[in-house]
Amino acid sequence: MLTSPERTLATALNFDMTDLTHNREGEVSARQQARLQAARNEENKDFVFGMTFIVLPGLFGCGACAFLFDIPVIIGSVDYLTEAIGLLVGVVAVGVVWSAWQGRKANRGVSDGIAAAVTGPLTLTSDETRQRPRFYIVIGEDRFRVPWRIYEALQMYEGIGQAHTLYYVPGMRYVLSIEAR
């Protein structure tokens, strides 16, 4: 049975005793797997948005080079066509490598259903110097990025500064649950 402070943690992070039991055993529960899948889908949306900022400037750069260096690609001359194609292929290759890296980073530990743990004093911090602020749960030396709603809910938690164990998915560093020590 969860006490009031533990209930605050469980409510903020959306976990229950079954999830916590699985996490203690180094596993991700079925319910948490479903939440992870939803988080991965959200990251995929961000990926498509990010790819737009790699491919479009690259295409614009190819067009600008063709215009500035008077490369008559449209007219049919092939003087600098190979360079323009090489630049375009390079931009696409950067996009492919970046997408592979993002996919690899997001999937580490997720498909295995492994939960890792870290223990230390619990603190909260934020980086509001960016246009879009970032919020973190800090356990010892490890920082875990969390949404604002979790950060806000934990600000009212009375166990800040005390030792806690945080369970997370390695690679993705997705926070699964926290318990006081």
Image: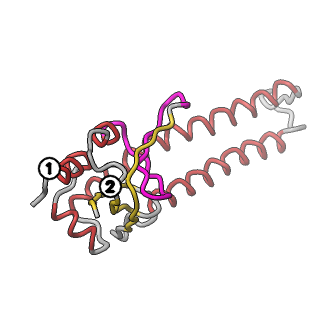
Q: Quadrant of the C terminus?
A: bottom left
Left or right, residue 62 beside residue 5: right
Q: Is residue 145 magenta?
A: yes
Q: In this figure, which residue is indicated by the disc labeled 1?
A: 4
Q: In this figure, which residue is indicated by the disc labeled 2?
A: 36
Residue at figure coordinates x 75%, y 29% from the top left? 63
The x, y position of residue 118, in whole percent, is 40, 65
Read off the magenta span: 129-149
Number of other residues with Cα within 10 Å of mark 2, as a class: few under 14, some 14 to 19, many 20 or more = many
Q: Residue furthest bottom?
A: 25
Q: Is residue 136 magenta?
A: yes
Which numbered dot is residue 168? none
Q: SS at mark 1? A: helix
Residue 176, placed above or below residue 12? below
The x, y position of residue 158, in whole percent, is 26, 46
Q: SS at mark 2? A: helix
Residue at figure coordinates x 62%, y 47% from the top left? 95
Residue at figure coordinates x 33%, y 69% from the top left? 113
